[in-house]
Image (spheres, rainbow, N blue to C red):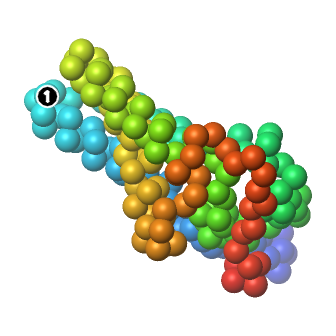
Amino acid sequence: MKPKAVRIRRIRHSVARIKGMGSILWTAKHELFHIMLGFMWVWAMRERWQEMNPVWLWTAAFGSLLPDIDHFIYFFTYGKRDPYTRTIITFLKNKEWRILVKFIAKGHKYNTNLSFHNYYITAMLFIMCAMVYVLDWRSAVIFLGSMLTHYLYDILEDLLVLGHVNQNWKRWGRAKQSVVVGPPIDDIR
């Protein structure tokens, strides 16, 4: 049997990890909102079609999260030299998970150089969603509609958080040259 002090330390360490995970999940609620909007899209289409397919829930979850791959493309390719990305890499290397998640949650609105977060992609998704709706390709309607709700929510969030629409929404592709600056680190810790 292990000494009581060792067992107490392990319990405290486990509780601390759980508290950290709770903080991470709370901060990452942005992604959960996207999934919920995708599920709401499934519900709306279920009401319209009077049919429900459980696969649509998985399709909606995937479609709701897929547009955020744009952030990973930015981090690992054309934006890897920006101070914002370097700060994120530092937090990753130091395993400061809670600070990393809070920094990304507060700072992702400062990233104005995303290639696919723009009005043109949003309009293309709307047109494609309307086309597959007319063709009655239901899984495609769920997938594209979930992606569309993601972008529409991001636009609304920009208006609510920043007071204006982020610059990346107004151009095709990424800016020729820009430096992304995240929020002050003192606000994160």
Q: Is residue 188 above or below residue 98?
A: below
Q: Is residue 132 left or right of residue 93?
A: left
Q: Nearer the viewer, residue 140 or 134?
A: 134
What percent of the width, then of the height, locates residue 19? Answer: 63, 73
* Residue 151 visible at all: yes
What percent of the width, then of the height, locates residue 20? Answer: 66, 70
Q: Residue at x 40, y 61 (%)?
A: 156
Tell me the quarter of the picture where residue 155 sits.
Answer: bottom left
Q: Residue at x 67, y 51 (%)?
A: 113
Within-10-Å neighbours for mark 1: few <14, some 14–19, many 20+: few
Quarter containing the C terminus: bottom right
Q: Is residue 72 above or below residue 59?
A: below
Q: Nearer the viewer, residue 167 or 18?
A: 167
Q: Residue at x 76, y 56 (%)?
A: 178
What percent of the width, then of the height, locates residue 78? Answer: 79, 42
Type of the residue with mark 1 = Trp
**Residue identifier under label 1:** 49
Q: Is residue 188 above or below residue 122?
A: below
